[in-house]
Amino acid sequence: MPQANKDKIRALLKSIETGDPEPVAVVNEAKYVQHNPQTQEGSEGLAVLFKRLSLTSPRVNIVRAFEDGDFVFAHTEYDFAHRNIGFEVFRFEDGQAVEHWDNIQRRAGPNQSGHSMVDGPIDAEDHELTEINRELVRSFVDTVLVKGQLDSIDSYIDAQTYTEHNPELGDDVANLRSALQATTDNRRSIDYRRIHRVLAEGNFVLCVCEGYVAGRHSSFYDMYRIDTKKIVEHWDTTEKIAPRTEWKNDNGKF
């Protein structure tokens, strides 16, 4: 049986820790497009880079990984110079990874409800509901996060069973509502502006968005777990987007 793309990515990311050059073969470096603005393209082969990084004794934990057509999306823990949480997205073409996006945040928490940024279920279920769950999350993000229609939150989230992994919030949906509330001058501290991509496998859905946090241009990666057409769990990372003058490639964050 051919190896699943998500297992190829698990092996690739783990090779950052081990320095094993074999998993790097999953990447078509001739076509590879890097969307991390802080990563320079073409300066060093991945096998050489990962071997060098492995000498710094990094720790890599791929917490959960999913597939959506040609895309793999993974939720990861990294312990390099700092302990970070990340989402990694890869696009495949002809059996190899040809494009990569990510979103990294310094690890914090546990939050007021005792949850870390990564704990919780890891396996996708309800695969037959993938498209229904994708559209549920797209509608939630567009209606509540982008358009700010906070009165609609209860239509999307099961407040009785909701589990929140954001280190600044808790399971009480009132915390989320308060964080998203506009100020008296109609400005929002957390300001979602645009949905770029919605990836899904079964009951797990990852939404990639662009916006602002306290006026800073930022990228939002939000992962949701769905149960019976309601959001019951949420993980996320938020990353400031560096000014274009500081980018090391011209591919764009999204």
Image (tube, helix red, strand yellow):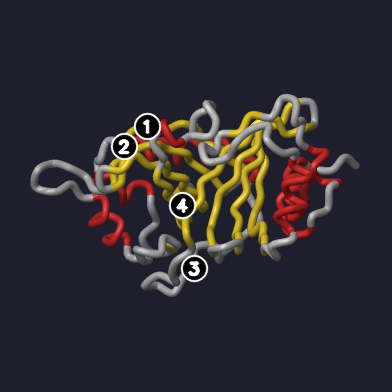
On residue 116, which mark appears?
3
Give the image quarter of residue 90: top right
Disc with the residue nearer the chain's start (2 vs 1)? 2
Give the side of residue 63 with respect to residue 226, left or right.
right
Identity of the residue drawn at 52% across and 43% down: 206
Q: Amino acid at mark 1?
A: Arg
Local packing at callout 1 (Cα closer than 10 Å; few below 14, some 14-19, many 20+) is some
Depth order, front residue of 174/46: 46
Identity of the residue drawn at 67% across and 62% down: 58
Local packing at callout 2 (Cα closer than 10 Å; few below 14, some 14-19, many 20+) is some
Q: List x then y, in percent, for residue 191.
A: 28, 42
Q: Is residue 228 visible?
A: no
The answer for how far apart the CA atoms under marks 4 and 2 are is: 17 Å
On residue 237, which mark appears?
4
Q: Is residue 16 visible?
A: yes
Please report contact status of discs 4 and 2: CB closer than 8 Å, yes or no: no
Local packing at callout 4 (Cα closer than 10 Å; few below 14, some 14-19, many 20+) is many
Please report contact status of discs 2 and 1: CB closer than 8 Å, yes or no: yes
Give the mark toward the camera: 4 or 2: 4
Disc with the residue nearer the chain's start (4 vs 1)? 1
The answer for how far apart the CA atoms under marks 3 and 1 are is: 27 Å
Identity of the residue drawn at 38% across and 42% down: 218
Position above or below: 61 against 253: below
> What residue does disc 1 label?
194
